[in-house]
Image (cartoon, rainbow, N blue to C red):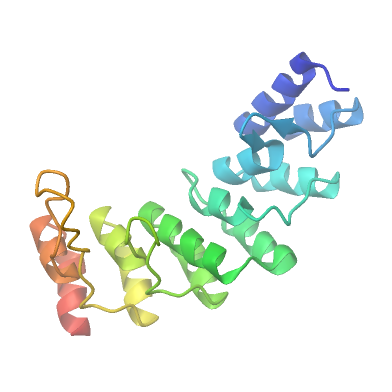
C-alpha cells in the first residue's frame, strides 16, 4: 500500500508538471492508477494539461478509458490538444462525453481542442441535459471568438437561444430567452456578433 505522503507527493508532482519527480515516485512503487479523493493522478494530469506527465502515467498503467477523462482534459485551464487527441484515439469516448467535452472546451476557447473534438464527431448543437447550455452559447458567454468561429463553420445553429426556464428569475439568468446574436451584443462581443450575423 502506498503511503499517504508518497501519494501526496505524486499528486503534487502531477499538478506541477514535474515529470522527473513523478517518474521517481512511480519507480518507488506509487501506482500510476492510485486513487485520490474524487479524482486520480491521470485526471489531474489531464486537467492541468501536462501532456508528458499524462503520457508517463498511461504508459505506467493508468487507465485511459476512464469515462470522465475527456471532460477533465477539456475543462482544464489550458486544455492540451495532445492529451485530448490521445484520449480520442485510444479510449473511444461515448457521444455524450464528446459533446460535453466540446461544451467545456468552448468555455476555454482552445481552438485546437475545439477543432479536434468537432473532428471526432462531437455534436456542435448538443445541449447539456441539466443546464441547457451548448458549445456556441458557452463560447459567446466567455468571449471565445475562435471557438465560436469553429463551431459556426461546423454547423452550430446561429439562431440558438438561451433556454427560457420559467423557474428562473431574470436576476438568476439575465440572458434567458436571448438569441446567440442578442447575447453576443449584450456582452459586447462585437467580433462574435459580426460572425453570427454573417452566419444568418
Q: Quadrant of residue 160?
A: bottom left
Q: Position of residue 70 (x, y in %)?
A: 59, 56
Residue situated furthest front in the rendering: 167
Is residue 32 rendered to the left or right of residue 200? right
- Tally the marks: 0
Q: Quadrant of residue 125?
A: bottom left
- Between residue 122 and residue 114, name the one nearer to us: 122
Residue 47 versus residue 176: which sits nearer the camera?
A: 176
> Residue visible at 84% across and 28% down?
30
* Image quadrant in which the N terminus is located: top right
Residue in the image at 33% along x and 77% along y: 156
Instruction: Using the image as rendered, state which of residue 3 and residue 145 is in the foreground.
Output: 3
**Which part of the image, by quadrant, shows the C terminus?**
bottom left
Q: Is residue 11 above or below residue 60?
A: above
Does the image show residue 17? no
Q: Vertical placement of 78 versus 31: above or below?
A: below
User: Residue 170, image x and y in percent?
Assistant: 9, 49
Give me the residue at 78% from left, 50% from top. 63
Residue 144 at x, y percent in the picture? 30, 58
Q: Position of residue 51 (x, y in %)?
A: 66, 48
Amino acid at each position: 500500500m502506498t503511503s499517504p505522503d508518497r501519494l501526496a507527493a505524486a499528486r503534487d508532482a502531477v499538478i506541477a508538471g514535474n515529470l522527473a519527480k513523478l517518474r521517481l515516485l512511480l519507480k518507488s512503487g506509487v501506482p500510476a492508477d492510485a486513487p485520490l479523493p474524487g479524482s486520480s493522478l491521470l485526471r489531474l494530469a489531464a486537467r492541468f494539461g501536462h501532456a508528458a506527465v499524462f503520457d508517463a502515467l498511461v504508459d505506467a498503467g493508468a487507465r485511459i478509458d476512464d469515462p470522465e477523462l475527456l471532460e477533465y482534459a477539456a475543462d482544464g485551464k489550458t486544455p492540451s490538444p495532445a492529451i485530448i487527441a490521445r484520449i480520442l484515439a485510444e479510449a473511444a469516448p461515448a457521444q455524450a462525453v464528446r459533446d460535453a467535452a466540446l461544451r467545456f472546451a468552448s468555455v476555454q476557447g482552445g481552438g485546437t481542442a475545439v477543432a479536434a473534438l468537432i473532428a471526432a464527431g462531437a455534436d456542435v448543437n448538443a445541449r447539456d441535459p441539466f443546464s441547457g447550455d451548448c458549445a456556441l452559447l458557452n463560447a459567446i458567454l466567455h468571449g471565445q471568438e475562435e471557438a465560436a468561429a469553429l463551431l459556426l463553420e461546423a454547423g452550430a445553429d446561429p439562431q440558438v437561444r438561451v433556454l427560457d426556464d420559467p423557474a428562473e428569475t431574470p436576476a438568476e439568468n439575465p440572458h434567458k430567452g436571448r438569441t446567440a446574436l442578442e447575447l453576443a451584443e449584450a456582452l459586447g462581443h462585437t467580433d462574435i456578433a459580426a460572425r453570427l450575423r454573417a452566419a444568418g
